[in-house]
Image (cartoon, helix red, strand yellow):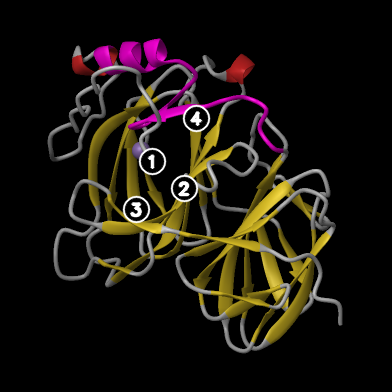
Amino acid sequence: MSLGLAINTVIGRDADLGDGTTVTRLLPRRRRRSIGAWCFADDYGSLSVGDGPGMRVGPHPHIGLQTVTFLVAGEVLHRDGLGNAVVVRPGDLALMTAGSGIVHAEESVPGTGPILQGVQLWIALPDDRRWTEPIFSHHGELPEVELGGFVGRVLIGTLASATSPAAVHSPLVAAEIRSRSSATATVPLESDYEHGMWSLSGSVRVNGTLLERGTLAYIAPGATELLIDSAEPSRVFLVGGRPLEEELLLWWNFVARTSEEVSAARSRWEAGEFAPVVGYDGPPIPAPPLPQGRLTARL
Ligand code: MN
């Protein structure tokens, strides 16, 4: 069996969500800023939320991006400044388009622990869609496709014969791919996309390379398939997209292009000019101070 193209690996880092919960940040990293328009990826790992308040991320603003939330275990209550209060359950896709600006808060739902497991990713909106109206969409019904001994659940874009109903603004794919036992699969890829894959649970090899937990496998454009195999029940997360040709400026919760845009969004937040979240029991998160001198990405 051919092992396919070699893959590069990028090691994630611990990141604090600001409420004491620590997650693994896989994007952006110094060696890998984005994969297609995917510009941010947090893996919650297996957060213990049974004993304490769980995950509680208070109201904070976003501009210029879409957030993707996908859970494997536990439940998260999403509230936003459009008036949505939605419980996100395992297998659902929560897709929030910030566009010109939106505020949201996220908290694990009491009694749905003891473990919260899942991911949150950001999609950079292309330049001509950045100032769109904010919208939140919740997809409970998502297509699945058999891939050898694995099943792919397609969250964004198309994988094999299955296409997600979720609306995105650039060529992208995202899927959870899981097996109930030892299994092998050939995963078809768009050859003009770059891709990333990481393990959500279990031990999986990609093109023959073991995917350690907390490590992102990067697959450059040109690959038409990936070979995955596991010796046990396992889950991986796949993202892909056409490589970005735009230079992004990520600062705090903003995806911008210039430091002036970041500074304007920060001022709007500090002045209370975003539509607020109603019903969250806690204070909004203050923006960090702007650094002296030229603004650069906070990684
Ligand atoms: Mn957020």
Q: Mark 3 belongs to which amino acid?
A: Val
Q: Are marks 4 and 3 in contact (CB under 8 Å)?
A: no
Image location of residue 159, percent across then percent down: 76, 55
Residue at horizontal 63%, vertical 40%? 166
Residue under label 4, please give it: 65
Crowd band around label 2 with a 10 angstrom C-alpha radius: few (<14), some (14–19), many (20+): some
Where does the C terminus fall, quadrant-wise? top left
List the residue tagged with mark 3. 76
Q: Nearer the viewer, residue 214 or 155?
A: 214
Kindly tell me whether mark 3's CB lies below 8 Å from ligand 1.
no
Badge 4 or badge 3: first in the primary sequence:
4
C-alpha distance separating marks 4 and 2? 18 Å
- Left or right of residue 233, residue 164 in this image: right
- Kindly identify the amino acid type of the residue bearing the numbered disc 2: Arg
Residue 294 position by quadrant: top left
Residue 181, disc: none
Q: Which mark is residue 29?
A: 2
